[in-house]
Amino acid sequence: MINDDRAAVLSDSTTDRIDIKPVVIHVCTSCRARNAPREPRDNRPGFKMYQNISRLIKESELAPHVHVKPTDCLSLCPRPCGIAISSNESWSYLFADQDPDSGPPDILKCVSLYMSVAEGFMPRERRPVSLRASVVGRVPPTDRLSIADKQPSKTITQ
């Protein structure tokens, strides 16, 4: 990782805030290019990305707040490599087409942004360039669902 990139990640960090919520980065470790060998598993680009992101998080000030979890499959097979970013009471994001070597610094910048915005909502123009077009989806925070939201408008009898 280039020192300038690392400095940018740390300067964008929100670790001095008291109310930081833990963030989870799920990394698809089974991601591989079509026709690439399945074995050895630790040679797959997804597994390498997991290792690279884990290393960078451990070296950053984000480490106490971010957990990197290996995930067997994020169902992004036509668009490897994939990650998901999530936190309680925040939007969750799914990204594809990440490069295992050059992508992790931008992923850390994105996580830093994610931690700094209300409910994890990241407008496209604020995300690092490599994570703008690669978003596959986002899911609203589940804390907005209440029991009243689940109730039908009229009583159903059996």
Image: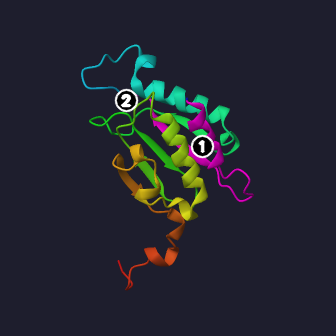
Q: CA distance from mark 2 to mark 1?
A: 25 Å
Residue 16 is one of the magenta-drawn residues: yes
Task: Please tell me how crowded label 2 is: few (under 14), some (14-19), or many (20+) other residues with Cα within 10 Å.
Answer: many
The C terminus - image quarter: bottom left
Q: Position of residue 108 (x, y in %)?
A: 55, 41
Q: Position of residue 85 (x, y in %)?
A: 50, 47
Q: Does the image show residue 87?
A: no
| Residue 78 visible in the shown view | yes
Seen as rendered, the residue at the extreme front is: 4
Q: Quadrant of residue 9?
A: top right
Q: Which residues are magenta?
A: 2-30
Task: Identify the image's colour scheme: rainbow, by chain, secondary structure or one colour.
Answer: rainbow
Q: Quadrant of the N terminus?
A: top right
**Which mark identifies residue 125?**
none
Residue occupying image coordinates x 36% and y 81%: 157
Name the residue rendered at 30%, 37% in the picture: 79
The answer to whether 45 is drawn above or below residue 16 in the figure is: above
Q: Which residue is mark 1?
A: 9
Residue type highlighted by circle 2? Cys
Residue at the spot 43% in from the left edge and 78% down from the top edge:
151
N-terminal of the pair, mark 2 or mark 1, is 1
* Location of mark 2 (residue): 31
